[in-house]
Amino acid sequence: MTIRRSLTPFTGQPAVNGVHARRAGVRHELTERVRLTTEAGEVLEGWALNISRGGVRVILEGKVLLGEELDVTVGEQNPAARSRGRIVWIQEEKDGLIVGVEFIGLSGTHRAIAPADVPTPRS
């Protein structure tokens, strides 16, 4: 059974040119390691499924809270793409979680990691 919780309710708005009304940019498929570091210093590791200017979709085995803010590191290249993020939706699956992480800047706005900053997927 899948259970989904979200801070951003469904708006019913159709996608325009592949971009949803609440999304800050087009999604780019990505298979890259992701580290989420909590305020308490706990590190949760997972895999990115896709990324956009506004956030990243991640598979995790650990637990996170809706609305929780974390440090997000995408990729293992030196330097990896880093940003601040907020958990905006959680989808509970039998074997873990799929979460939506919104990138936030110091002002609380989107656009901390651009697709050009994202590590190149490995072949």
Image: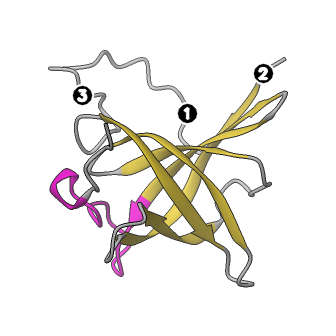
**Closer to the camera in the image, 16 or 120:** 120
- Asked whether, in this view, residue 75 is left or right of residue 121, the answer is right
* Residue drawn where x is 35% and y is 70% of the image: 80
Which sits earlier in the primary sequence, circle 1 or circle 2?
Answer: 2
Q: Amino acid at mark 1?
A: Pro
State the residue at coordinates (42%, 61%): 74
Left or right position of 79 against 50: left
State the separation of the CA atoms marked 1 and 3.
17 Å
| Secondary structure type for disc 3 | loop
Q: Quadrant of the C terminus?
A: top left
Tag 1 residue: 9
In this view, 24 is above or below 66:
above
Magenta region, main secondary structure: loop
Asked whether 46 falls inside the magenta stretch, the response is no
* Secondary structure category for the residue under label 1: loop
Q: Earlier in the sequence, mark 3 or mark 2?
A: 2
The residue identified by callout 2 is 2
Nearest-to-viewer mark from 3 and 2: 2
The residue that mark 3 highlights is 19
* Structural distance between the alpha carbons of marks 1 and 2: 17 Å
In front of the other: label 1 or label 3? 3
Amino acid under label 3? Val
Q: Label 2 sits on what residue type?
A: Thr
Could you tell which of marks 1 and 3 lies nearer the N-terminus? 1
**Residue positioned most to the front:** 123
Residues 71 and 43: in front is 43
